[in-house]
């Protein structure tokens, strides 16, 4: 009699309102409710039963674990029978096979309760198994899609890393398979877009949509909130400012057009422009083509000096030399940690490569003037790749002669002269800070002030010179070269 009462109660719950249970079950197919665990819990509550979804090996996929007859469960899972029902120890058990996407083996839905299964409860179990099959297929499809998107993102990052080390041939080869024609160009712009880390994935997707797959969109491996976009075509780059304008607290920095071999230089320019974009009404800025010191130098002398400085690396195999030079360029432009993330190697690898270059060049990168000089040589080499160092006038010049041109001296005096109007003697602080290797504490001891005062003076010099100094990189090296050209710092013993 007790069994009939329980059965009647279950019947009222499942058949009330006609076939109301069908509507409840279909709710689990909505995007917000696609969870096999919730389906198993619904089935257990609807039938007042214990529900278990297990794979062929007995691993629990959803519900609560149920001890099954191994032989019977194997028959159902193998497909020799679609379903089975039995009574064990006063408990009624129903088993239904649940197919899963290939190559996963089928699972078994086991429902156990104290009262027999009537037609309605049997229908509920059968339809629930079908819903579970749909959810498992959708989950597998979503998982495969996620894996594909991750693989594509990894490939984009690999292409960018190859471009960063000037391996354009390999980069084109990798890109050709998935994005034909993307790198069929010699030049490109690089943009860096900044947003909140939690918004970056969506931003990257919007960038891909806005550029119509005509750009290389990469989630920056060094900064969580940055998306890097390399655009060989102008139209793709033009689609980015409107995208940024629609998103609050999002900023865009762009480079000048550079050769693909100078992607690392373009990236540095974009990061520099990004700092300016934070103060622009449109939150976007493109790297200003201001006068750079190397453009005021005698090209033949610059090429000859560069060739002389880097000559100790010439005996190395080409790929080793290219790897060392590209890593050193990035290591001088950014921190070793950031350079390692950009290149996809460990920071110890970056430091080891830079240490090797230091040894070969007989230099010390702890000296900021040395870093500026080597940075100048590396950028000069990248900008004149393929040109003979001996073309034009044979040049066996040292850095002093290279910096002695009247145009360069006039530029240096004009740049540093902007600091003279500030009563805090920013010029003296900046010169001392550079000589101290950009260490505020050492500069403070020399000047007899607090280290925080030194930092405030350097920050004060940044808007006057229109260059980032505390962040290091190209902007700082230009200011160091200005001091060397103006004779306010002793030239380092590099390059002859």
Image (cartoon, rainbow, N blue to C red):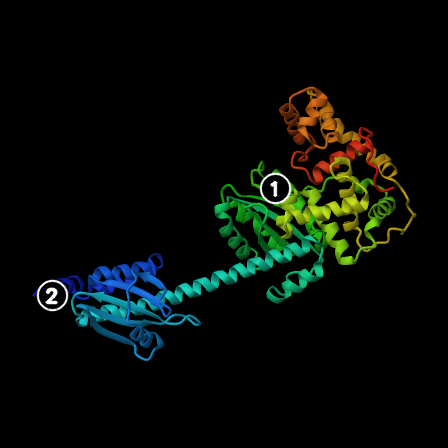
Classify 10 Å Cα crowding around label 1: few (below 14), some (14-19), many (20 and above). many
Q: Which mark is residue 393?
A: none
Provide the residue designation for mark 2: 3
Seen from the viewer's position, the closer of residues 128 and 365 is 365
Hey, which residue is sitting farthest left in the picture?
A: 1
Left or right position of 100 against 458? left
On-image quarter of the C terminus: top right
- In percent of width and height, residue 8 lies at 11, 64
- Of tags 1 and 2, the one toward the viewer is 2
* Residue for point 64% across, 21% down: 450
Residue 107: where, in percent of width, then height? Answer: 35, 69
Q: Is 344 rendered above or below residue 75?
A: above
Q: In this view, does 329 lie above or below 61?
A: above
Query: Residue 174's spot in the image, x, y percent?
Result: 64, 63
Graded by Cα atoms within 10 Å as few (under 14), some (14 to 19) or many (20 or more), the crowding at tag 2 reads few
Q: How far apart are marks 1 and 2 (CA)?
A: 73 Å
User: Which residue is drawn at the image coordinates 73% and 31% (left, top)?
Assistant: 434
| Left or right of 465 in this view: 103 | left
| Residue hosting label 1 | 274
Of the numbered discs 1 and 2, the one sitting upstream in the chain is: 2
Task: Identify the residue at the far right of this view.
Answer: 394
Nearer to the camera, 205 or 430: 430
Instruction: Tell me if 55 is positioned left or right of 457 in this view.
Output: left
Residue 346 percent coordinates (x, y) = 63, 50
**Disc 2 element:** helix
- Residue drawn at x 63%, y 43% is 271
Q: Is residue 418 in view?
A: no
Q: In which quarter of the image is the N terminus?
A: bottom left
């Amino acid at each position: 009699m007790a069994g009939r009462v329980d059965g009647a109660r279950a019947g009222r719950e499942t058949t009330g309102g006609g076939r109301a249970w069908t509507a409840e079950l279909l709710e689990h197919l909505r995007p917000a409710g696609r969870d096999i665990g919730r389906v198993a819990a619904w089935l257990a509550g609807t039938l007042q039963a214990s529900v278990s979804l297990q794979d062929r090996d007995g691993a629990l996929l959803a519900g609560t674990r149920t001890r099954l007859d191994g032989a019977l469960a194997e028959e159902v899972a193998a497909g020799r029978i679609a379903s089975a029902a039995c009574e064990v120890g006063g408990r009624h058990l129903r088993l239904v096979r649940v197919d899963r996407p290939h190559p996963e083996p089928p699972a078994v839905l086991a429902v156990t309760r104290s009262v027999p299964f009537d037609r309605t409860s049997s229908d509920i179990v059968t339809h629930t198994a079908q819903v579970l099959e749909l959810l498992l297929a959708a989950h597998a499809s979503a998982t495969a899609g996620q894996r594909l998107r991750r693989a594509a993102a990894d490939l984009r990052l690999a292409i960018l890393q190859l471009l960063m080390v000037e391996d354009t041939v390999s980069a084109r080869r990798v890109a050709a398979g998935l994005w034909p024609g993307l790198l069929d160009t010699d030049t490109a712009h690089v943009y860096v877009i900044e947003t909140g880390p939690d918004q970056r994935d969506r931003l990257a997707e919007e960038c891909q949509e806005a550029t119509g797959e005509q750009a290389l969109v990469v989630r920056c491996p060094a900064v969580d909130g940055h998306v890097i976009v390399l655009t060989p075509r102008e139209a793709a780059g033009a689609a980015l400012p409107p995208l940024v304008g629609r998103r609050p607290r999002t900023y865009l920095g762009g480079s000048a057009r550079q050769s693909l071999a100078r992607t690392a230089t373009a990236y540095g320019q974009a990061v520099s422009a990004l700092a300016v974009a934070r103060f622009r009404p449109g939150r976007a800025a493109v790297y200003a083509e201001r006068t750079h010191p190397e453009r005021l130098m005698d090209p033949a002398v610059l090429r000859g000096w560069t060739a002389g400085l880097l000559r100790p690396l010439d005996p190395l195999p080409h790929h080793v030399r290219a790897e060392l030079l590209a890593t050193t360029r990035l290591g001088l432009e950014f921190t070793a940690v950031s350079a390692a993330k950009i290149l996809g190697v460990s920071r110890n690898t970056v430091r080891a490569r830079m240490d090797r270059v230091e040894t070969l060049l007989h230099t010390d990168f702890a000296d900021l003037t040395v870093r500026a000089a080597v940075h100048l040589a590396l950028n000069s080499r990248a900008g004149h790749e393929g040109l003979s160092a001996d073309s034009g006038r044979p040049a066996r010049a040292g850095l002093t002669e290279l910096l002695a041109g009247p145009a360069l001296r006039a530029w240096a005096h004009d740049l540093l002269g902007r600091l003279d109007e500030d009563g805090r003697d920013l010029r003296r602080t900046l010169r001392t800070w550079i000589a101290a290797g950009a260490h505020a504490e050492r500069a403070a001891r020399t000047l007899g002030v607090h280290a925080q005062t030194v930092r405030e003076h350097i920050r004060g010099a940044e808007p006057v010179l229109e260059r980032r100094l505390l962040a290091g990189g190209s902007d700082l090296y230009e200011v160091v070269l200005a001091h060397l050209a103006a004779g306010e710092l002793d030239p380092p013993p590099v390059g002859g």
